[in-house]
Image (cartoon, helix red, strand yellow):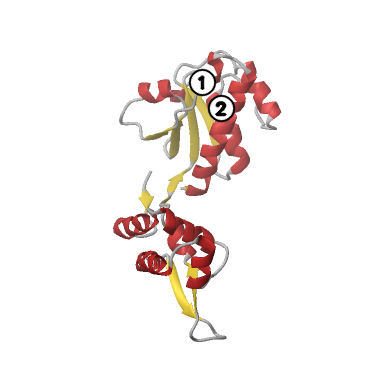
Amino acid sequence: MSVELNSSAADRAVVFAALADPARLAIVDHLMVADASPSELSAVLGIPSNLLAHHLGVLKKSRLVRQSRSEADGRRTYLRLDHAVLEALVPTGHQRADRVVFVCTQNSARSQLAAAIWNRRSEVPATSAGTHPATQIHPGALSAARRHHLHLRPQIPRYLGDVLAVGDLVVAVCDNAHEELPAELTRLHWSVADPTRTERAGAFDAAVHDLTERIHHLAPMLKTA
């Protein structure tokens, strides 16, 4: 997946370095929801004024914190957090695809659940396939889908070669499939534990939770081609 940084790597490194101190993290935490004067920060956080001045200097140099004068008393200043600088620490990626194809070995559990979760959250369509398809979807996956209100219809698992098309984004949701697929096939890999090993309901629920979290992060980054 191509990644576009919100700011240069050097700028982000400066911000990360500025945050690499417990006192500066405490200052940023306090400024997350409200502005404060240096004296107020010193009192609330218990930081001596001279040490606070040092930490504020580092934070202002990184552009995380800005300072402005009070409109009521020009001798007083207030500090505010620049949320845009903080948010730019996390790079955002943009991927274009006609469809998402989730792949596991048997196409009987994880890939089926992933496609069902994805189709509930994204306008980009998703389907699933396997490298060695089973004869049916695992009953545990169907039960987990019902528990989590996922639209997963009983169907015959399909072979990846019969499903894959130009414009598809392949996401391998198991280690076996990822390690078996040819290196030239561009794909993402999610190392999701196989719930069929134990066949316990909790294992299938854990797979749903893991897939849901991963899809939550990927779906906003994917656009239709």
Residue at the image position 43 percent from the left and 69 percent from the top: 49
User: Taking 10 as reference, is 142 above or below it?
Assistant: above
Residue at the image position 54 percent from the left and 32 percent from the top: 210
Residue at the image position 40 percent from the left and 67 percent from the top: 56
User: Taking 207 as reference, is 125 above or below it?
Assistant: below
Q: Label 2 is placed on what type of residue?
A: Ala
Percent position (x, y) of residue 106?
50, 18
Disc 2: CA contacts within 10 A as few (<14), some (14-19) or many (>=20): many
Task: Name which quarter of the figure residue 15 lies in.
Answer: bottom left
Camera sees residue 182: yes
Decide which of 224, 152 is in the foreground and name it. Answer: 152
Label annotation for residue 29: none
Disc 1: CA contacts within 10 A as few (<14), some (14-19) or many (>=20): some
User: Could you tell which of marks 2 and 1 lies nearer the N-terminus?
Assistant: 1
Camera sees residue 154: no
Residue at the image position 44 percent from the left and 20 percent from the top: 131
Task: Identify residue for label 1.
Answer: 194
Q: CA distance from mark 2 to mark 1?
A: 8 Å
Left or right: residue 155 versus residue 193 is right
Q: Label 1 is placed on what type of residue?
A: Asp
Tell whether label 1 touches label 2 (CB within 8 Å).
Answer: yes
Decide which of 110, 136 is in the foreground and name it. Answer: 110
Left or right: residue 193 versus residue 20 is right
Label annotation for residue 207: 2
